[in-house]
Image (tube, rainbow, N blue to C red):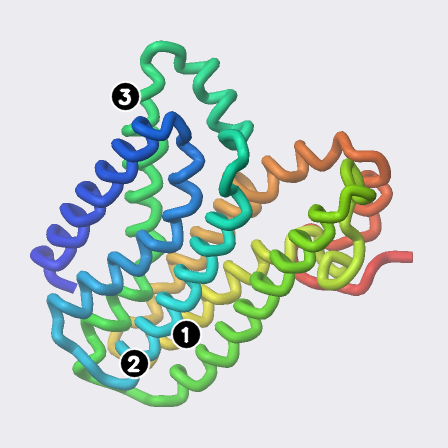
Amino acid sequence: MSRMLAGIAIICMILFMSVIWMIAVKLDNYSIVDIIWGLTFILTTIVVLLYTKNYNVVSITLAALVFIWGMRLSIYLFTRNAGKPEDYRYQDMRKKWGTKVKQTAFVRVFMLQGTVSLLFSLGIFLGISKSDTILSIWPVYIGVVVWIIGFLFESIGDSQLRTFIQKPANKGKVITTGLWKYTRHPNYFGEATQWFGISIIACAVPFGWISFISPLLLTFFLLKISGVPLLEKKNSQKPGYAEYAAKTSVFVPMPQKN
């Protein structure tokens, strides 16, 4: 991966996130940054493809999987959040940062998210930029299977949660059926699994194994920083959640404890 490619990707990400920030300020709703999370990876993929002009089974497979993941996630979040108030995280952020919320959000939310997206995209960078030399096709087959498993967990988990929430009788209750019977966060598990699949595919090219840094980092973020901790804190207030959590795996799907 050349410095020029890295520089172009960084510039494109800064410009993209700056535009999204301006739209968020105009709409007075910072939740939009969640919706475009998947699109940032599609942007990086397009930049790397156009710069390297490597069009082969590895690069096209990676691009297709990233596009499917990113578009599904963004469409899901858009339809879920449309017409709803700003997410409670950003409402708390406004109270904390006061009159400097715009400038602070630009750096600590939008630019930070763009930076994290680039860090998580190592599999895209390596897999596509070095795909002019393919060591073996087997990592592609294995990676696609792993990715599909992750995609099913994330998409089905999201769908089950959405259906559950839409029923008025379930307001304030905890979903404990479907995939949620085996893991408290099937969608997060699915997201991490998909990116492990991406890194496995990247192993088809020289030094592709280095890209495993990305899904490991993503999993750490989900488990310790941005995903699971926030939802666990929020859900802990719901009746019955303590009992559900005591017998249900937090991340990796497992049979419930007796």
Circles 3 and 2, Cβ within 8 Å, touching? The answer is no
Q: Nearer the viewer, mark 3 or mark 1?
A: 3
Q: In front: mark 1 or mark 2?
A: 2
- Please give the name of the residue rendered at 16% of the width and 64% of the height, measured from the top-left corner: 1
Amino acid type of disc 1?
Ile
The answer to whether residue 150 is left or right of residue 118 is right
In the current view of this chain or complex, which residue is farthest to the right? 258
Secondary structure under badge 1? helix
| Nearer to the camera, 150 or 82 | 82
Q: Label 3 crowding class (10 Å Cα cut-off): few <14, some 14-19, many 20+? A: few
Q: Quadrant of the C terminus?
A: bottom right
Dot 2: within a 10 Å radius of its alpha carbon, few (fewer than 14), some, or many (20 or more) residues? many
Instruction: Work out whether mark 3 precedes mark 2 in sequence or the reverse, and give the earlier one.
Output: 2
Residue at image x 26%, y 41%? 17
Q: Can you give x and y, in whole percent of width and height, for residue 43 in the image?
A: 25, 57
* Residue 22, quarter of picture: top left
Residue type at mark 3? Gln
Q: Secondary structure at mark 2?
A: helix
Q: Is residue 165 above or below residue 214?
A: above
Q: Which residue is mark 1?
A: 200
Query: Percent from the top left, x then y, of residue 9?
Result: 17, 53
Rendered location of residue 107, percent (x, y): 28, 29
Q: Residue furthest front?
A: 83
**Which residue is pictured at 40% across the width and 11% down the height?**
98
- Judged from this view, the residue extending furthest toward the bottom is 137
> What residue would you read off at disc 3?
103
The residue to which callout 2 is attached is 58
Label ID, residue 60:
none
